[in-house]
Image (cartoon, coloured by chain):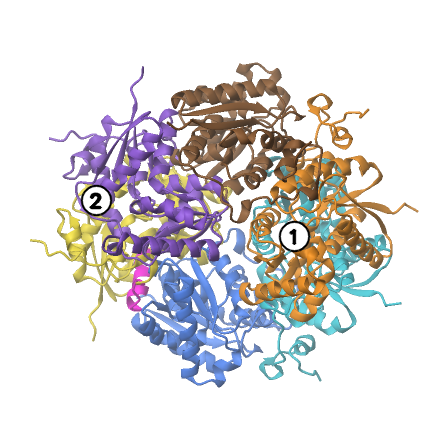
Chain colours: A brown, B purple, C yellow, D blue, E cyan, F orange
Amino acid sequence: MTAAKRLLVINPNTSKEMTAVIQASVNQSLGLLGGIVEATTVCADQGVASVEGSFDEVVSAYWTVDKVMSLLDAYDGVLVACFSNHASVKALREATNKPVMHIMESAVMQSLPLGAKFSIVTDSNHWKPLLEEGVQTILGSMERCASVRSSDMTALDTVTLSKQQVLDKLMKASQEAVSHDGAEVILLGCAGMSQMNQAIEQTLGVPVIDAVSSGVMAMVGLLLSNLRTSPQGMYTPLPARPDEVSVPNDGILKAYGRHSK
Amino acid sequence: MTAAKRLLVINPNTSKEMTAVIQASVNQSLGLLGGIVEATTVCADQGVASVEGSFDEVVSAYWTVDKVMSLLDAYDGVLVACFSNHASVKALREATNKPVMHIMESAVMQSLPLGAKFSIVTDSNHWKPLLEEGVQTILGSMERCASVRSSDMTALDTVTLSKQQVLDKLMKASQEAVSHDGAEVILLGCAGMSQMNQAIEQTLGVPVIDAVSSGVMAMVGLLLSNLRTSPQGMYTPLPARPDEVSVPNDGILKAYGRHSK
Amino acid sequence: MTAAKRLLVINPNTSKEMTAVIQASVNQSLGLLGGIVEATTVCADQGVASVEGSFDEVVSAYWTVDKVMSLLDAYDGVLVACFSNHASVKALREATNKPVMHIMESAVMQSLPLGAKFSIVTDSNHWKPLLEEGVQTILGSMERCASVRSSDMTALDTVTLSKQQVLDKLMKASQEAVSHDGAEVILLGCAGMSQMNQAIEQTLGVPVIDAVSSGVMAMVGLLLSNLRTSPQGMYTPLPARPDEVSVPNDGILKAYGRHSK
Amino acid sequence: MTAAKRLLVINPNTSKEMTAVIQASVNQSLGLLGGIVEATTVCADQGVASVEGSFDEVVSAYWTVDKVMSLLDAYDGVLVACFSNHASVKALREATNKPVMHIMESAVMQSLPLGAKFSIVTDSNHWKPLLEEGVQTILGSMERCASVRSSDMTALDTVTLSKQQVLDKLMKASQEAVSHDGAEVILLGCAGMSQMNQAIEQTLGVPVIDAVSSGVMAMVGLLLSNLRTSPQGMYTPLPARPDEVSVPNDGILKAYGRHSK
Amino acid sequence: MTAAKRLLVINPNTSKEMTAVIQASVNQSLGLLGGIVEATTVCADQGVASVEGSFDEVVSAYWTVDKVMSLLDAYDGVLVACFSNHASVKALREATNKPVMHIMESAVMQSLPLGAKFSIVTDSNHWKPLLEEGVQTILGSMERCASVRSSDMTALDTVTLSKQQVLDKLMKASQEAVSHDGAEVILLGCAGMSQMNQAIEQTLGVPVIDAVSSGVMAMVGLLLSNLRTSPQGMYTPLPARPDEVSVPNDGILKAYGRHSK
Amino acid sequence: MTAAKRLLVINPNTSKEMTAVIQASVNQSLGLLGGIVEATTVCADQGVASVEGSFDEVVSAYWTVDKVMSLLDAYDGVLVACFSNHASVKALREATNKPVMHIMESAVMQSLPLGAKFSIVTDSNHWKPLLEEGVQTILGSMERCASVRSSDMTALDTVTLSKQQVLDKLMKASQEAVSHDGAEVILLGCAGMSQMNQAIEQTLGVPVIDAVSSGVMAMVGLLLSNLRTSPQGMYTPLPARPDEVSVPNDGILKAYGRHSK
């Protein structure tokens, strides 16, 4: 009997609370699959407590690739649990041919068979252009995306507001996406919103995608099918260049073929 | 303990041989998943022995929806095992909210995390514009698609040529897709090519997607997540209109709410 | 003297009333042309009384191609009188090189020289995404299309409401297309709306296209110029494959080269 | 009995020979229609002998609008017989609501029902980017256009080479468009090439559009249907501003509401 | 020491007032650069007092190219001070390899590093579709353009209304572009609006581009870098064809290699 | 008299040689402008010796933003001297409203008025998809880009090969871009290629853009015009969140409002 495939799930910020939320969602999805794949959920060792824009992403991506590279030998694939086109994913696909995904692409993909147009509901206005750019990169166009809607929350709000207040704001934005933008499917654009999809689905009557769950399902498909990142073109493997790199991070040095002390 | 989900796989042509090939691939994929989902593979009762273009598709779609509607009560979802944007899928999404996919969209989706550009290798020249149109519909653009390449075979060739001759033709077209078109991932654009992906992957060193397997994996994700087709917009449910339909097919009549004799 | 060209106009649903409306419009247009072309208007023998979505289209396309193939020997070209990218058209272009059009593409084409942006006014919300997809296929983009606007009618409404009530709803949707969406030309997106274009044109002061009339004009141009469907690529001719088809329909069997009993 | 509609055909250069070629093609097309429309073909009084690029177009457009405005009262519509997105057309649509077309848009439109992809065969390399820009404007994208192919002729060549030599060059470019670019329909991208479409069609077996003929057919459709240019948006009518214009051209002055001496 | 580069700025209408406004803006920008480049600002000798649409542009382009060609020997480059994709620019790029720009392309370019989406605020509704077409040509898509907003002024209004009234209308349109369309940068789409950018920038807090200033900056970059228009493709040089041209304008004749009297 | 504006030029890798090449090019461009702006050229303190892909970019972006933030108080704007859509630029636009550009966007912008289509010539195949993605982001489409061409060099080659060998490879790729892809302007897609543009321009006769020089010219325009990054949308300013960040880098900590020890 072959050993089960092992999946590394990384929360690219430093929040333990967010990591726990992600872990619960991962476990629930894997439970549905009868344990055919094993997963570990970790977060970055350093960086920012939440990723709120492009500066945060530069910081987060650095510590994420360092963390993943230091753990990767023990896993068969990586899921980056951030609802964005997070830069670590593209980088990791050069550093390993083990499959690597982020939960934005899996959520977008899972929505496609369920309706002609999807909308992403995110927290702050700042994410709207960033996620639009992400959809453009993932699908090559915005044709299938009805809209990216902000729910007019700051990052702080998602923590300080009550669960019900957060849900009310997401519900309002989702409703507007359906009514005004022609959304047929809703994607909750933040890992931290994952428990709220059922409530919105029941109220609005349209499918609402749980991004973390979609990522687990897609990674399981890739792992069981033994599919690996292509070595051609965009993800040409990173060659060993130990003499060309100078950083104080063991994981990153390892990616360049340098033995750390 | 809840009963396992049941998946109906339909081969939209009347070929028993092709149905057997599909069934084997379905079973292999489900085997990897430990039987968490059960599947039945059937083919259309009437129509054409292979779907080679748009006229065939009109004929095939009619008998496919009739067959599926007559069986659907016993299943939780449907996979149409035809590598095309087969018209039956859109139709069935109106007739039921159980998830329905075809293997072209699942194969395209599964390829996206593995490389920036994919090519589809199909048999005849006739399929090139049809599959290009399919990609445009699925992703909303051709940006992620490096090319659709014909392997210069007629439908007849895939049967009368030896396995090795068919493989040689697919290998040549795949090689050209990688060298000339910038393909990073290859999709074999016909259900009947599914056993040949491994040989091509080993020779060319790029991932080659098995469309039937990708379809099973994606449907399992939808079924286990209890996701259903959106009732909004494109797939607005077919209302019961028993008095407006006159056809001799029980499955179709059932979709319109008419009790067949 | 050469005999006049003969045009077959097919209403792809089974409604005699709708067929009569189409016939009147065809005759009026041909009258303007001095009888240089002769036309016959028929409807499908079986299927649905109106085409309201993708399931209906699968059913309608099947019976439409069967009907057309059984009559085609006596005609020089075919106009499918359905304001949609009806699947029968693509199919028939494989089965004959006689020119085949539908009235959505002729209406879109006729509008292009009259304004930079057109809007389509249709009945129900269900048609909005379907017609958007049709524009994308016909022109290759949505750039020239200001919007597809629903007039918030069900199919039933167009029959049960008074003429004035229907006109009021179309007028309101057309007005909004001009004011909010930047439409410069209006297309009435249903064969049954053809008598109402003049009233809307007079009130709003923008050109309103009669789709059936546009189809007759475009077909006359193709017929008199002896233009035929290309045998290359998308519409590669359907080869005779009598042994590969099993259906109870004489017209369809004929397309595959099988002598019916 | 109502008087026949009158069509003004303008050749926007000063070549009498080209004007005669266009007139012959116009008459042939109108003959097929039984004289239901009357046409006059004229050319610009001043300007350039052939339009070979953007500088020529600026010069040609000026004298074209001057000529058309001086004659327009006697006509019901205008066809600009230049295979380009000639600037005079947009200008004239502001100066009159009588329908105005150029033969590039009519040719593109007539090709759409005949195949999924068309190519334009033009003379010099200089026209390739200009016609690509024209297709983008007419259809809103290049999706339906397989290619614009130069036949490597200078403007001079089309006059000094023998008819057979010109045909050979067009044939070669058309053949390459079909073989290499996936063209299903060919458009000859110059009014002066109009007699050669039949020879190419017979050799290559794909439809070849006669642009002048397509223009006559489309204008007849607009004229008989009493369709006029929209006053909204792009073609907002030119208001009378007699005091704001200072030019020595009576036709242009008339467009601005100034009585010439 | 090399002589300073000399820039010709042409206002393509006949308004002396507008020319003075442009000249002031040019001088201010060049002053910032310490006189490293010298500029002369002129206007067309004949034509229209303001360019309000496509008919005006045909007239304006003719007299603009005539004027520029008659002065060009004394200058190293040309800036067409009209916020539109003015036809004279494309024409002049064929007639000389000295760099030629218009202020719409420089303004669009200068905005790109300052925000992800820009909006153009123009005067009348007529300009909206024309400027949208301009953006499509300059960037190849509308992706970066949030909107083109009319400020609901006629050309007359900009002269007869008070400065404050004009500013109020521009402010309102700019505010709506930011609030409703997601504009991050504003472009004032008329040379005559150039003094108002600072007031709008201070009120709205987003960058507002002065188009004339952006044109001077971009032309200085091209001139100091000795960059010239490409002789390949779109701007293939106009060959001398003195015998093929008949116009009464010395500048235009010179472009064709004809010695005027 | 106001003090001169100060520009910070950052080479995002750690190579002193490359930094010297960039500095020479910056000084030459500023010399043409008479010293109206002052510049300092630095490189990252840690990271990689050259940026060859997405993993390198994650590492490089981190150390680039750290370096820039530690120096920024003394400067008025930042030019990132890397021919790619380098992630540091987007990040820095959140951390400061001083203008920030990279040399890929300035080079693309400077090419637009010189020809309808540009090609980028880069070193390795790996950069082709990355630079295509960059063009898509900068312009919103690939319409204006004829191609991205690799000159089949590794990063190592540009150092170990002779100057003439490198030039030969760039010349060959540039020639193919002009002949096969329709390029009218060439962009050399690497800061290290900046001395070679003149030789290629003289041989091929098309404009060749020096990316570093284009960046200096564009930054001078922004600085003298006092233009700043928009605080709306994509570049919403990074709020102070000292408690949410944990990294050992003083520059980055400063961006988050944390006083370093």
Q: Which residue is mark 1?
A: F155
Residue F224 rendering spot, x and y as whole percentages: 81, 48
Q: In the picture provided, is C232 more to the left or to the right than E165?
A: left
Residue A202 rendering spot, x and y as whole percentages: 41, 20
Amino acid type, residue under disc 1 in the picture: Ala
Residue B7 rendering spot, x and y as whole percentages: 29, 30
In the image, which residues are magenta? C215-230
Q: Chain of mark 1?
A: F
Q: In the picture provided, is F30 more to the left or to the right than A126?
A: right
What residue do we see at 52% from left, 78% from top?
D155
Label of residue F145 in the image:
none
What residue do we see at 49% from left, 26% from top?
A212
The C terminus of chain B - image quarter: top left
User: Tag 1's secondary structure?
Assistant: helix
- Residue C157 visible in the displayed image: no
Label 2 to label 1: alpha-carbon separation: 52 Å
Residue B76 rendering spot, x and y as whole percentages: 29, 27
Label of residue B17 in the image:
2
Q: Residues within 10 Å of mark 1 (few under 14, many from 20)?
A: few
Q: Is residue B38 above or below residue F168?
A: above
Q: Residues within 10 Å of mark 2 (few under 14, many from 20)?
A: few
Q: Chain of mark 2?
A: B
